[in-house]
Structures are given as structure tokens and as C-alpha cells.
Image (cartoon, rainbow, N blue to C red):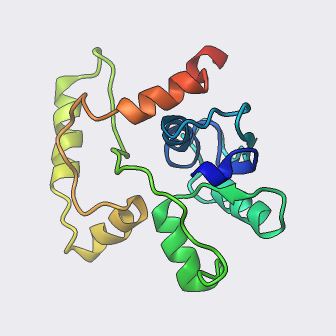
Amino acid sequence: MADLNGRTIGFGAKDSPQATLIPIQMLHGHGLKADQDYKVRRFDVLVGKHGDHIGGELDAFKALADGRVDASCLLDLNWEGWTRDGTVNSSEYGIVATIDRFDHCVFTVLDSFSEDREKVLLEALFSMDYENPDHREMMDLEGLKKWEPGRTSGFGPLTMGCQLTSYFEER
């Protein structure tokens, strides 16, 4: 991680938990401050959708491949898919660090949301079975094997990433 000091790092969209917000928090935890110890180069694709999971991350990797950045951040599922399909040559590139696992695909509703509608939504989600081919494709796209009940804990790294980037202050 210390080798990233003074370098340019390619990140995904500014609202991407896995390719911007949490990595910036992790780098900060290693003593590296954004735009102070390293230059941030964001690839803002589909901002407002919590980071496009492919476009911005692929653009960040392409910038690494052609020398515009010294490192890039991307989702592990993209790394696996891109090394499998030849987009990334794993003998030329390697993983420097990984962030801790984090909750994603989080659904929230307003207090005014109908309890009856919430019940229908939860029943639909919790009835999904990874062994069912009709469900598996969508679940694979989201990198999950089952839906978990909601909780409010476990968002520390994402919260810190939002604070470090002043994400909500910009809005």
C-alpha cells in the first residue's frame, strides 16, 4: 500500500461503494489521504446508480493498462470475469489489496411505504432459491446466493468513505 504514495489511482464512479468510497476509506486507514498522498482519477459512469459496476471500473482498468493511472479499483466479480474472458491478463496485473466484504443490494423504504407492499417485496426476495435457474442468473449478477434480513449495522467503511469524500456535502 505504501507504494501507492505519490501515484495516481483510478476509481470507479464517485458513488460506487466498491470502486471508490470503500477503497478511499481503506487507503486512508493505511495512512494515504486522497488528493494529498495520491491523485484520485475517477471514471464517472452512470453516477446516481451507486456506481456502474462495469463501465467505470473497466474504464479505470483500461487507464491502468495504457499508463494513465498507476493502480485501479474494481469489484472482485469483475476481476474474476475479466481474467476469465481475457479482458485482464492476470500474469501482467495483480491484486495489491482487497477491501473487507460489505453489504450490497440493500433495499430501503420510506416510513410511509405500505406494510402490505413491503411484505410482498420481502416474500418475493426471500422465496428466491439459488438452485432455481430462473433465480440464479439474477443472483449471480448481484454476487449473492441468498437474501438476508435487513440490518443497520455493518456500514462503517462505507459511511467513512462518504465522509472522507464529502459525498453527501456535494449533493
Percent position (x, y) of residue 131?
19, 74
Picture quarter containing residue 35? top right
Q: Residue at x 28, y 67 (%)?
A: 135
Left-right relation of 163 to 139: right
- Residue at 84%, 58% in the rendered image: 68
Residue 113 lies, with reference to residue 1, above or below; the image says above
> In the rendered view, does 29 fall on the left or right side of 114?
right
Image location of residue 4, percent across then percent down: 66, 50
- x 67%, y 34%: residue: 34
Name which quarter of the figure residue 146 lies in.
bottom left
Q: Quadrant of the C terminus?
A: top right
Q: Where residue 79 appears, x then y in whole percent? A: 53, 69
Count up the numbered dots.
Answer: 0
Height in image: 76 above or below 106? below
Q: Residue at x 60, y 37 (%)?
A: 32
50 or 78, nearer to the observer: 78
From what the image shows, is residue 161 above or below residue 110? Answer: below
Which residue is the extreme one toward the front? 2
Q: Measuring from the top left, give residue 88's x and y in whole percent.
A: 64, 77
Q: Does residue 151 appear left or right of residue 161 in this picture?
A: left
Between 167 and 41, the one lying in front of the other is 41
The quadrant in which residue 130 appears is: bottom left
